[in-house]
Image (cartoon, helix red, strand yellow):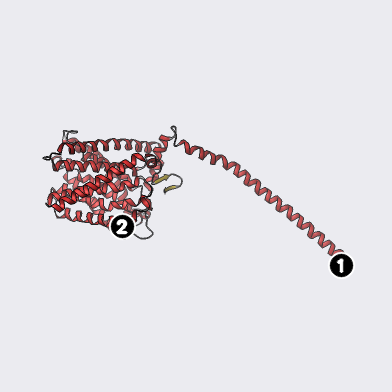
Amino acid sequence: MHIASSYNIQQWCSFKKKHTTMVDQRKLESIIDCHTTVSHHQQPAIMENNQEQPSTEGSNGSHSSIITKINAGYFRICISAGAQALLWKSINQHHRTSNLHTIIATTSTVFWCLTLCTLVFLSLLYIMRCIFYFDLVKAECCHHVGMNYLFAPSISWLLLLESTPLFVFPDKHVYGYIWWLLIVPLLALDVKVYGQWFTAEKRFLSIMANPTIQISVIGNLVASLSSHVADETGWKEIRICLFTFGMTHYVVVFITLYQRLSGSNHIPSNLRPVFFLFVATPSMATLAWESINGSFDIICKMLFFLSLFLFVSLTSRPLLFKKSVRRFSVAWWAFSFPLTFLALASISYAQQVKGKATVGLAILLSGISVLVFISLFVCSILKIHLLVHKPTLIFSTSLGSTNV
């Protein structure tokens, strides 16, 4: 009896084992079938993405690809070109009696025409981006870096207006009307961005602070720089108002950037050339106050010395930019216009404080500025594919924006 029961137990265990094995096999087969089915459903999507990728490089999709990738950050090129045109115009004004006057005047006009063509082209592309891909523009507005570059188009046009040769608009009042058209979007952005720093809890300045935020300050300073709308048009008070906006927020931004917390929005290593904005802001403030005040006084000297100190501090730390210069990108253009603004300030300083040292400093900074601009311009032409199709910021409506 005991033997029979043991035999029955063994049979039952054997049957249970076989049944369990069969069930496991069926589960495994069902899992494999499901995986195969999912793979078959996903494979066309992957192939479709792979097929779409080359189409952006082809003739049919190249235009849409460029429009989706050209963001407001590309206007750094126009700011640099406009600053160079303004530099050569300043040199031309201080060397009217020189034998090189004709060459300098021609160079100034060439830079202005180059700035105009580049700015018109990029502006048309960005207008098309706003029309056909407005969701990308909204994503740009919500990004802690991309939002600040929305000031760049207005800055570019204001620099172009300031560097315009006198023969373009014989009537000086035309400058004033154009200037008003350019500062309207700038003031609208001021209300939007500065208001968020005070009222939006998730967008407080202490949270959003990064070096690119100084572009908003530079916009107000460039607007107050315009000498064409000085006392003869009766709008000097507006320029003082814009300068007040810029300098008030510059003090707040400067202190915030110096003591920003570890949890705040930092920038990736490939965007580190924007640290030169620390040089651009006080340099432009120097030029703006000189234009408003009419002389290079003690305030201008203090701002100029601050910008010179920050320039030396940055150039003494080349390892800070080691990763950012490994691959050419539009971020490199952040090196150019701050140096040009500093060179312009040094020229004004040399005119006020006569001496070989000040003149030598102005020549040195101007030479470095021109050399950097020409180098970046040549690199941009030789690596135009990398410049356009490898942006430093990619904005997406579904995944937000990512740095590359």
Of pointers 2 and 1, the one earlier in the residue sequence: 1
Mark in front: 2 vs 1: 2
Residue at image mark 1: 2
Mark 2–mark 1 distance (CA, rounded to whole Å): 90 Å
Q: Quadrant of residue 103?
A: top left
The answer to whether residue 285 of the structure is visible from this angle is: yes
How far from the left and from the top, in percent, is residue 177?
21, 37
- What amino acid type should be assigned to the residue bearing mark 2? Arg
In screen coordinates, is 54 left or right of 350? right
Q: Is residue 47 above or below residue 205?
A: above
Of residue 322 and residue 212, the one placed in the foreground of this image is: 322
Residue 4 higher or lower than 25, as above or below: below
Depth order, front residue of 228/187: 228
Percent across and percent down for residue 209 are 33, 55
| Coordinates of residue 152 in the picture (x, y in percent) | 30, 44
Which class describes the residues within 10 Å of circle 1: few (<14), some (14-19), or many (20+)? few
* 350 with respect to 12 (left or right): left
Tell me if label 2 and label 1 are in contact, CB under 8 Å: no
Residue 154 at least partly seen: no
- The residue tagged 2 is 317
**Secondary structure state at the residue bearing disc 1:** helix
Label 2: which secondary element = loop
Residue at (26, 45) in percent of width and height: 371
Location of the N terminus (image quadrant): bottom right
Query: Residue farthest to the bottom?
Result: 2
Residue 305 picture location, percent across and down: 20, 56
Residue type at the position of mark 1 = His
The residue that appears at 34% across and 41% down in the rendered structure is: 380
